[in-house]
Image (cartoon, rainbow, N blue to C red):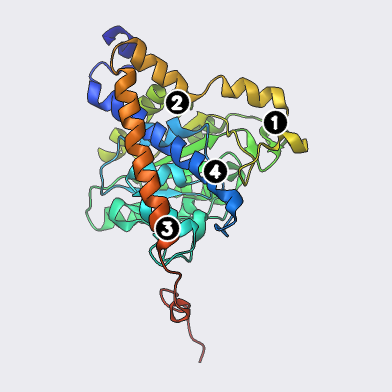
Amino acid sequence: MKEDLLKYGLSTLTKTLLIDLFASMLRIRMFEDKIIELYPEQEMKCPVHLCIGQEAIAAGVCLNLRKEDYVFSNHRGHGHTLAKGTAMKPLMAEFYGKITGCSKGKGGSMHILDIENGILGTSAIVGGGIPMGVGASLASVMKGEERVTVIFFGDGASEEGVFYESFNFAALKKLPVVFVCENNFYATNSHQSARQASCKISSTAAPFDSHGTCVDGNDVLSVYKAAQEAISRARRGAGPSLIEAKTYRWKGHVGPEEDFEKGCRPKEELLYWKEKCPVSIFREFIVSRQIITENEIESISAGIREELDEAVRFAKESPYPEASELHKDVYFGTRD
């Protein structure tokens, strides 16, 4: 086992942490599967962008973070928030538009807020969370707080001008921020090769004299190691880093369907990536090395199922917001 971890440069990882990485990925997968099961009931009125297939990135990054560290995410942010510590009850209630939701029923699945766990908001605007994350990181420095900010975004957002402007500013000020690009190769239905002349997002960091690395986003230990190094660099004042984690989403851009049926991508491509399932691969890794038993896995799964059942019951039984809530928590300017 120690030799296996040495190849990752992770010889100090504990059994507990390895199991926590697996449990975090499994919790995300089971949550997303539950959304697929419930969505056809049409009680959830918001669109859902699922992260099935990408769980290793959220778990590998967020298990390196402290509770007070900040996370900014995008429209596909369920996994990031769950990995950072968001409870299922308020998250599920938000999907149902209930007042007990993490955004009081006003945000839906694309606008998640959990200040207690350092999640200051997910944005449905492509690249929208990037400048907000850099701004929060600057605020942390100005206030003398020892926080690291992680910003998750997709390969499509790497084409937005705000990404380059924000990275430049973060590098200029040596801000403690880590940019994590979940490169699943598709911006909606457009493949990366049709959009980018050079498909090397991690190299973007070099012109700003910053650290960039590309990892297998389906290998949770590779992600964990890259995040560990980047977050450590940020904490010691060495400035921003960029992690490009190559992965693949199993479901369509939005909704619970697999969009190959609509001609959006090749079925063979999806099947290839399903063979690289991050949850299954890591499960085999820890079982074969006697880190965990099948009975222990079932116990973890049972605990997650119970949490999910309670979250669904809580969401369905919670009330909708009163009409008086419409103008609360909304900020606007006035004209003379």
Which amino acid type is marked by label 2? Val
Callouts 3 and 1 close, C-beta under 8 Å? no
Q: Of 71 and 161, which appears nearest the observer?
A: 71
In this rendering, the answer to whether 7 lies above or below 268 is above
* Res 279 label: 2
Q: Earlier in the sequence, mark 3 or mark 1?
A: 1
Q: Of circles 4 and 2, which is in front?
A: 4
Residue 280 lies, in percent from the top left, at: 46, 21
Which amino acid type is marked by label 4? Glu
Q: Earlier in the sequence, mark 4 or mark 2?
A: 4
Q: Residue at x 32, y 52 (%)?
A: 118
Few, some or many residues within 10 Å of mark 3 (<14, 14–19, 20+): many
Q: Of 247 and 156, which appears nearest the observer?
A: 247
* Res 193 label: 1
Quadrant (top left, top right, bottom left, bottom right) of the N terminus: top left
* Res 315 label: 3
In the displayed structure, does residue 156 sit left or right of residue 324?
right
Q: Earlier in the sequence, mark 2 or mark 3?
A: 2
Q: Of 188 and 332, which appears nearest the observer?
A: 188
Which amino acid type is marked by label 1? Ser
Cα–Cα gap, marks 3 and 1: 41 Å
In the displayed structure, does residue 16 sit left or right of residue 267?
left
Callouts 3 and 4 close, C-beta under 8 Å? no
Residue 145 lies, in percent from the top left, at: 23, 52
Few, some or many residues within 10 Å of mark 1 (<14, 14–19, 20+): few
State the residue position of label 4.
Answer: 37
In the displayed structure, does residue 16 sit left or right of residue 305?
left
Q: Earlier in the sequence, mark 1 or mark 2?
A: 1
Cα–Cα gap, marks 4 and 2: 19 Å
